[in-house]
Amino acid sequence: MALPSFIILFTSLFIFYIGLFIFLQERSSSLNKTFFLLSISMGGLVLFNFVSAVLPVLWTLQFQFFFGALMGTTFLHFAFIFCEGRMKTKYLIALYSIGTSVGLLSFSPVFIKKFYGFTKLGEYGLAQYEAEMGWGLIIYLIFSLFCYLYGIFKLVKLFKSSEGARRIQTKYILAGLLVFGFFIIFFELVLPVFKIFWGTVTSGPSSLFFLLPTAWAVWKYRLFTPKETFRSIFETMVDSVAVTDLERRIALFNRSLLHLLGYKKENILGESIDIILGEGGGKELLELLRWKKEVRDKVLEFIAKDGTKIPVSLNCSVIRRAGEFMSFVIVARDIRERLKYEKESEKAKVTLEEKVRERTRELEIAKKSLEESKGILEIKVHARTAELEELTRNLENEVKKRTKELQERVDELERFRRLTVGRELKMIEMKKRILELEGRK
C-alpha cells in the first residue's frame, strides 16, 4: 500500500475512534452523540477518498458526495447543540432531510449527469474526477457552504459573548476550523489551479486538525447542555422527586425516590401515585392542590415497598398547560432523622425543665432559709443594739457620777489648798511678829 493511501486509511479509522471514544465518555449527552455523527460523516468522507484511490470508479465518488453532504449537515447540527443546547425538532428534521436528499441524489442514474455534470473519470495524483459544474453540484456546494458558514457564525457569536470554560471550548473548536478551512482552500482550491492535486492525501490530516481540538473541548471541559444539566441535577438530588401524568400515574422519578422506597424502576413506573401515598392519597393531594395550587412542608408518610411508613416533608405543585391541569410534581424529603432529633430534643427539653424546676425548688428553700436567718439576725441585731444603747446610757451616767466625784475632790483639794496656804501665811506673819518682839527687848 502506498504511503498516501495508508495515511488516508489510518486517519479515517482514527477519526472513527475519536468519535466513538467521545460518545462512550457520556452516552446520554446529546452533544457527544452529535459529535459521534460528525466523526462518522467526516471519517466516511476520508475513507472513500482512500477507496477512490484504490478503486477509481463512479460509486466511490458518489459516496464521497453523500458523506460530504452529511458532514455539512452534522456540523451544523453540532454547532446548534454546542451553542444552544438543542435544535428544534422541525428544524432538525428539515436539516437532515435536505442534507440526506442532496447526498442521495448522486446515486440516481437519472440525475448523475444532470445533477453533478459528470463527464469522465481521470486520475490526478491518487484519484481525481473531472466534472463540469452541473446545477446539482452547485446546489451541493451552496448547501455545504451554508451549513459551514452558519455553524461558524453561531460559534463566533458564542465566542464573543461567553466567558471562562465556555469561551475556551469555543476557542478550541474555532482554531480547529481555521486550520481545517486553510487546508481546504489551499489544497482543494488553490493547488488544483496549478494542476497539483493533493486534496485527497491531505483530507485526512486536515479533518484531524478540526476534530482533535473539538474532541478536546468536548471531553476535557465536559460541556453539558441545559437538558443534560437538568437531568444531572434531577438524578443527583437528595430529595425524592416524582412527576405524575393526567391519571395520577408516576411518569418520572429520580434515584433518590427509588433508594428511599426500595423500588426498582420497573416496579414503580406507570403505577398510581397511591402506591407511595397510600390508598386515596393521590386524589386527596390533587383536591388540595386545586384549592392551594401548591403545597409546602406538608408532613405525611410515604409507604415503602416493604410496607414501612416513612415520614417525609412534602412540597407539591401543579403543572399546567394552557391553563389546563396536566400533572403534579412531588418533592419529598426524608425527615426520619429530623423527627428523631426533635424527639431527642424534646426529651432533653423535658429533662432540662425538670432539672430547672428542681433547682428552683432548692433555691426557694435556700431563699426561705436565708430569710429566716435574716429575721433571726435582725432580732439579734436589735437586741444587741438595745444592749449597746443601755450600756451607753449606763456609761454616760457613770461618767457623770465620776465627773461629779472628781469635781467634789477638786473642790475639797481647793479648800485644803486655801487652808494650807492661809496657815503658812499666818506662820510667816507670826515669825515676823516674834522677830519684832525680840528686837524690842
Image (cartoon, rainbow, N blue to C red):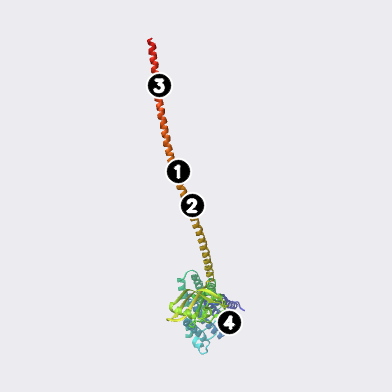
Label 2 is placed on what type of residue?
A: Ser
Q: Residues within 10 Å of mark 3 (few under 14, many from 20)?
A: few
Sequence-wise, the earlier of marks 3 and 1 is: 1
In percent of width and height, residue 145 lies at 47, 79
Query: What is the spatial separation of the Cα atoms under label 2 and label 4, in whole angstroms?
Result: 116 Å
Residue 423 badge: 3
Q: Which residue is mark 1?
A: 388
Q: Residue 230: where, in percent of width, then height?
A: 50, 75
Q: Earlier in the sequence, mark 4 or mark 3?
A: 4
Is residue 26 visible from the viewing direction of this image? Answer: no
Discs 4, 3 touching: Cβ within 8 Å? no
Q: Amino acid at mark 4?
A: Val
**Regarding mark 2 in the picture, which secondary structure is present there?**
helix
Which residue occupies 41% across, 34% down?
403
Residue 335 badge: none
Q: Earlier in the sequence, mark 2 or mark 1?
A: 2
Name which residue type carries label 1: Leu
Q: Which residue is mark 2?
A: 373
Query: Where's residue 69, x and y in %?
Result: 51, 82
Query: Contact, CB < 8 Å: mark 2 with mark 3?
Result: no
Q: CA distance from mark 3 to mark 1?
A: 51 Å
The mark that comes first in sequence, 4 or 1, is 4
Q: Earlier in the sequence, mark 2 or mark 4?
A: 4
Above-or-below relation of 404 to 143 = above
Q: Amino acid at mark 3?
A: Arg
Which numbered dot is residue 51?
Answer: 4
Distance (Cα) linking label 4 and label 3? 176 Å
* Label 4 vs label 1, nearer the camera: 1
Where 232 sits versus 426, above or below? Answer: below
Q: Position of residue 214 (x, y in %)?
A: 53, 74
Count neighbours of disc 4 (C-alpha within 10 A) and say few if under 14, some if 14 to 19, many if 20 or more: many
